[in-house]
């Protein structure tokens, strides 16, 4: 699918580089048209490197191709971010004084503006009138986010996060009938993310170092592939992406209940959460005190349910056509290496795919980059995926789609 990404002259332009990456990693061909002012914030070389296409904002470059006509006609979608007050004004007035505004006038497909400006500018009567004019023409203008702006000010006017803009773009394309079909289009995918916390007393808990980043990346990738996504979130250091059906849990028992409830209506289940293997046998009703005249407390642990194995058993007993993916955060020892333990886990659990990573001090948890090996129950050659957690999520979701197609 062909996307035109217009970049306005605001400091939030730096965030649009990530939005571009979301489009390209989803397989879309993106032509970036920055305004002249925006190149003071992010240079043309950045857009060319990330998009793989030549970039210009000059109507007199490539005249023989009549770029403003070609780009406007060929684009399945035009997204403008950040849409400054000036850009909204020029678009509403129908000005055509650079490549972006001329392309907007030639647009045949849906158009989406993601505004970003100071609160007073967003609230000004002129901006409100321009937004109303654009919306009356069938153009989608998102509401800006509320939060920290440039400098010390806060309020409405912040650029929505790239994931939110991307999700809105997917919804717009779907409603316009321009979204490409993938193996996950129309499917329901349940994903668990984050780390469970098992309470010891009203203050303390047993937890783990999971940040939830990989689970969120998986949810975003599944959304990009056209799936309906249920995200069962334990403790996470990152927000859930827009567009998911969010269920929040704390403990392994709560996660089990939510996963089993969601399984009945899911085409695929990806168990990316770091679920505690043990929990305290006894929950103290009051804070456990540290006292010099009292012996150190002894904490007895009991096993938590094996949720992954239970999901597999339930699938087999009901005959569901469903793909189940497990995750294994492993360390090697003198008995076996990481893959040895992972293969044994895959055999024991019975899931279709097992995503394996090696963990340890300063490895994997909380990092933005990772490396995994994906094992298939059918015994096919293991797949190695590395790079950002977004890259790894795309690889996992692609294999899930292929597995669903093979059912």
Image (cartoon, grey):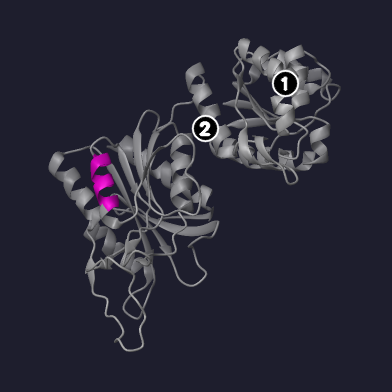
Could you tell me if the residues under marks 1 and 2 are in contact, i.e. CB atoms within 8 Å? no
Residue at x 79% of width, y 41% of height: 41
Q: Secondary structure at mark 1?
A: helix
Q: Quadrant of the N terminus?
A: top right
On the image, which quarter does residue 227 sit in? Answer: top left
Residue found at the very far bottom of the displayed protein: 293
State whether the magenta stretch is mostly helix, strand or loop. helix
* Labelled disc at residue 167: 2
On the image, which quarter does residue 340 sit in? Answer: bottom left
Camera sees residue 86: yes
Camera sees residue 84: no
Residue 75, horizontal then vertical, whole percent: 63, 21
Q: Nearer the viewer, mark 1 or mark 2?
A: 1
Horizontal relation, residue 80 to residue 406: left or right: right
Q: Earlier in the sequence, mark 1 or mark 2?
A: 1
Q: Secondary structure at mark 2?
A: helix
Residue at x 48% of width, y 22% of height: 174
Residue 200, horizontal then vertical, whole percent: 31, 67
Residue 86, horizontal then vertical, whole percent: 78, 24
The magenta stretch spans which residues? 254-263
**Residue 279 among magenta residues:** no
Q: Nearer the viewer, residue 170 or 208?
A: 208
Residue at x 75% of width, y 34% of height: 54
Horizontal relation, residue 320 to residue 202: left or right: left
How crowded is the residue under tag 1: few (<14 C-alpha within 10 Å), some, or many (20+)?
Answer: some
Which residue carries the number 1 mark?
127
Q: Nearer the viewer, residue 392 or 247?
A: 247
**Is 255 located above or below residue 221 in the figure?**
below
Residue at x 29% of width, y 46% of height: 324
Q: CA distance from mark 1 to mark 2?
A: 25 Å
Residue 110, horizontal then vertical, whole percent: 59, 18
Horizontal relation, residue 329 to residue 299: left or right: right
């Amino acid at each position: 699918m062909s996307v035109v990404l217009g970049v306005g002259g605001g400091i939030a332009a730096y965030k649009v580089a990530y939005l571009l990456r979301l489009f390209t990693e989803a397989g879309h061909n993106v032509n970036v048209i920055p305004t002249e002012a925006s190149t003071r914030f992010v240079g043309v070389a950045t857009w060319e490197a990330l998009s793989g296409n030549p970039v210009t904002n000059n109507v007199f470059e490539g005249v023989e191709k009549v770029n403003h006509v070609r780009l406007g006609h060929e684009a399945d979608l035009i997204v403008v971010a950040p849409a400054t007050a000036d850009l909204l004004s020029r678009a509403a007035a129908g000005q055509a004084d650079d490549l972006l505004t001329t392309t907007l006038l030639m647009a045949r497909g849906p158009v989406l503006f993601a505004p970003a400006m100071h609160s007073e500018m967003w609230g000004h009567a002129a901006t409100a009138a321009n937004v109303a004019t654009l919306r009356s023409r069938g153009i989608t203008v998102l509401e800006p986010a509320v939060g920290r702006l440039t400098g010390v000010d806060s309020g409405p006017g912040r650029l929505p996060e790239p994931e939110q803009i991307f999700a809105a773009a997917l919804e717009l394309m779907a409603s316009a009938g321009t979204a490409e079909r993938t193996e996950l289009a129309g499917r329901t995918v349940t994903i668990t993310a984050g780390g469970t916390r098992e309470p010891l007393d009203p203050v303390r808990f047993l937890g783990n170092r999971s940040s939830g980043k990989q689970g969120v990346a998986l949810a975003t990738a599944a959304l990009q592939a056209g799936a309906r996504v249920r995200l069962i979130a334990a403790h996470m250091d990152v927000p859930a992406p827009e567009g998911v059906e969010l269920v929040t849990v704390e403990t392994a028992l709560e996660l089990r209940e939510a996963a089993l409830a969601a399984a009945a209506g899911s085409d695929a289940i990806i168990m990316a959460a770091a679920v505690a293997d043990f929990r305290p046998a006894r929950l103290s009703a009051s804070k456990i005190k540290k006292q010099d005249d009292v012996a150190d407390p002894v904490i007895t642990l009991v096993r938590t349910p094996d949720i992954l194995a239970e999901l597999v058993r339930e699938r087999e007993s009901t005959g569901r056509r469903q793909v189940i993916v497990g995750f294994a955060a492993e360390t090697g020892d003198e008995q076996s290496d990481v893959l040895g333990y992972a293969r044994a886990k895959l055999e024991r659990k019975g899931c279709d795919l097992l995503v394996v990573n090696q963990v340890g001090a300063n490895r994997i948890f909380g990092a933005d980059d990772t490396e995994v090996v994906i094992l298939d129950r059918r015994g096919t050659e293991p797949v190695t995926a590395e790079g950002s957690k977004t890259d790894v999520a795309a690889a996992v979701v692609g294999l899930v789609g292929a597995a669903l197609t093979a059912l």
